[in-house]
Amino acid sequence: SQQGEEDPQALSIQEGENATMNCSYKTSINNLQWYRQNSGRGLVHLILIRSNEREKHSGRLRVTLDTSKKSSSLLITASRAADTASYFCATSGAGSYQLTFGKGTKLSVIP
Amino acid sequence: GAVVSQHPSRVICKSGTSVKIECRSLDFQATTMFWYRQFPKKSLMLMATSNEGSKATYEQGVEKDKFLINHASLTLSTLTVTSAHPEDSSFYICSAKLDRGGGETQYFGPGTRLLVL
């Protein structure tokens, strides 16, 4: 069953601004991953954070994880028009490689 | 590295026909592949886990006789939508997990858009 819930569902910002997307989940997890999907295309893996980690960085991306609140956030700094896409969080439990995806946030970066 | 391809990228078929979608890991071996379905403006729903050399594991509510999965080699899994109907129209995406290295990361194919008339 789907357990990830992203908010906001849609986000529109100006180029150069930061974009923050949140994800909540319901059950215990082994790790949480963020993926990006351009319209009508496959998914691109962005970053993985394990349940024992609190924060992770990769380039302009910053991910936080709060297992006590069962939530995660993805921050994209200095956004670019090319960042326009849908962003999904996905969780997997202990001993399983199966991913459960959230509903996604559609990000629009206006040049 | 870690490229996954899907074929075809787009298919239109008549109701009642069967459609086969291929998912290939191009530069790595993948004992385990996954098939997802995505409706417009919706998230991905896991349909089944495909295991090389054994039967696929289907998620609850997914008809195994409707969505036939074959994982005959370490680089190829196929999904056949049998007797397709308009309600089967969707975006089908596969992913593969590296047998060695890669950890928990899944690598996704570009997707196949199926339209059943």
Image (cartoon, coloured by chain):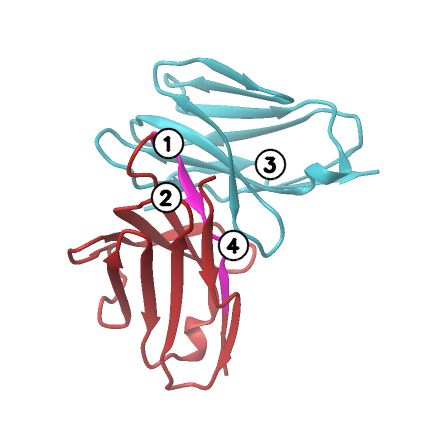
Chain colours: A cyan, B red
Residue at the left extreme?
B54
* Amino acid type shown at disc 3: Pro
Q: CA distance from mark 4 to mark 1?
A: 19 Å
Q: Chain of mark 2?
A: B
Q: Residue tagged by mark 4?
A: B110
Q: Is residue B84 magenta?
A: no
Which residue does the numbered mark 1 point to in the structure image? B102
User: What is the distance, in whole Å, between disc 3 and disc 2 at their CAs?
Assistant: 36 Å
Same chain letter for marks 4 and 1: yes
Whether the residues at callouts 2 and 1 have beta carbons within 8 Å, the answer is yes
Residue nearer the viewer, B31 or A108: B31
Mark 2 or mark 1, earlier in chain: 2
Q: Which residues are magenta?
A: B103-113
Nearer-N-terminus badge (4/1): 1
Q: Residue at x 36, y 80 (%)?
A: B18
For image coordinates 47% across by 71% down, the residue present is B89
Which numbered tag is attached to residue A9? none
Name the residue carrying label 3: A8
Rendered position, B110 above or below A2: below
